[in-house]
């Protein structure tokens, strides 16, 4: 009976996994189909003709035309890819400079209003972009940062989620170790760099991975704050691809997915630790 239950669980899990990765498999196979085959399969969707759309995961006539066109003939793809990478890297660097010390301060030091400040961070973390959009727009307008990459970078730098996640790890640093370091004459900066960062490395990396995934594929802020198409990130370039270039769109989307997949695979272990840490009671 127990073996049967385990077998049913495995079948259920594999079925769910297969359903979850089906869009990625469609994306991969579509990247190597020519336009004629895609039109034949997706004609009711692409051309609004009568009938039902179909799909097969193995291209009948595989082609590298879409890949060649993307890598050799599409300057817009490289420009928007670089814009996304630039925005993401500057955001991550800013998070390390501001969010990491803020999380350490909340976790280690006792000061009046500490719990209230942490509670405020949690509230701000839960607010969707639609709620803060107007205030962000007015602030960026006063700073004359609209229609520039800084309009996307600055809100990301001061994202409260990274502080929340790092705080959970820094809070787990044994207080006895910190006190022992102070007794030995170590300054606060020495304690932070030689004790806090090494022991909180898992939280820092997991926060950076999640911030990368969010920043690289963000859509709403660029849509609101950027008007110049030369500044658009990759997430805004993909919807602009003409529907008659479905194969090219599949290929571009596949390459847009690769950085996120690589970063996720690199930080998967730390993400699991971050999820486990955030559910622990303080």
Image: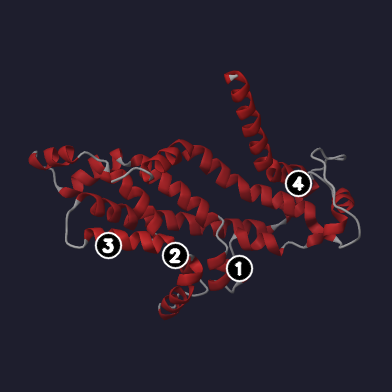
Counting from the top left corner in percent of width and height, residue 16 is at: 64, 38
Vertical side of 151 occupied by 46: above or below: above
In the displayed structure, would residue 104 be above or below residue 21?
A: below
Q: What colour scheme does the image use?
A: secondary structure
Task: Indicate which disc, 1 or 2, sits on the residue closer to the N terminus.
Answer: 2
Q: Nearer the viewer, mark 1 or mark 2?
A: 2
Residue 179 image offset from top left, x and y in percent = 13, 41
Count numbered badges in the picture: 4
How far apart marks 4 and 1 lie (CA) works out to 25 Å
CA gap, disc 1 and disc 2 = 30 Å
Q: How crowded is mark 4: few (under 14 residues within 10 Å), some or many (20 or more)?
A: many
The N terminus - image quarter: top right
State if disc 4 and disc 2 touch (CB < 8 Å): no
Residue 117 is marked as 3
Q: Mark 1 points at which residue?
A: 230
Question: If you read the primary sequence from the N terminus, does the residue marked by circle 4 or circle 1 appear first?
Answer: 4
- State how far apart marks 2 and 4 are (Cα): 37 Å
Q: Name the residue under label 2.
A: 127
| Of residues 116 and 98, the one drawn nearer to the viewer in this rendering | 116
Q: Do residues under tags 2 and 3 come within 8 Å of each other at their CB atoms?
A: no
Q: How crowded is mark 2: few (under 14 residues within 10 Å), some or many (20 or more)?
A: few
What separation in Å lies between label 3 and label 4 (alpha carbons)? 48 Å
Q: Which of marks 2 and 4 is in front?
A: 2
Dot 4 corresponds to which residue? 31
* Closer to us: 99 or 228: 99
Which dot, 1 or 3, sits closer to the camera?
A: 3
């Amino acid at each position: 009976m127990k073996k049967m239950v385990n077998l049913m669980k495995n079948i259920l899990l594999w079925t769910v996994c297969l359903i979850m990765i089906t869009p990625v498999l469609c994306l991969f196979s579509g990247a190597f189909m020519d336009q004629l085959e895609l039109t034949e399969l997706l004609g009711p969707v692409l051309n609004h003709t009568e009938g039902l759309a179909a799909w097969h995961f193995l291209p009948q006539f595989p082609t590298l035309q879409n890949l060649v066109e993307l890598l050799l003939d599409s300057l817009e793809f490289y420009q928007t890819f670089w814009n996304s990478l630039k925005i993401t890297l500057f955001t991550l660097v800013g998070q390390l400079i501001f969010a990491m010390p803020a999380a350490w301060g909340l976790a280690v030091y006792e000061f009046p209003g500490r719990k209230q400040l942490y509670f405020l961070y949690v509230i701000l973390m839960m607010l969707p972009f639609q709620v803060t959009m107007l205030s962000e727009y007015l602030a960026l307008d006063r700073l004359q940062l609209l229609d520039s990459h800084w309009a996307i970078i600055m809100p990301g730098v001061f994202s409260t989620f990274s502080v929340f996640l790092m705080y959970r790890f820094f809070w787990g640093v044994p207080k006895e170790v910190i006190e022992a370091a102070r007794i030995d004459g170590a300054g606060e900066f020495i304690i932070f760099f030689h004790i806090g960062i090494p022991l909180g490395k898992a939280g820092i990396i997991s926060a950076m991975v999640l911030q990368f995934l969010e920043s690289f594929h963000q859509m709403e802020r660029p849509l609101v704050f950027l008007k110049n198409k030369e500044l658009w990130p990759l997430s805004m370039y993909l919807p602009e691809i003409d529907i008659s270039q479905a194969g090219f769109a599949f290929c571009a989307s596949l390459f847009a997915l690769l950085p996120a997949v690589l970063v996720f695979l690199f930080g998967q272990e730390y993400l699991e630790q971050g999820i486990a840490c955030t559910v622990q009671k303080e």
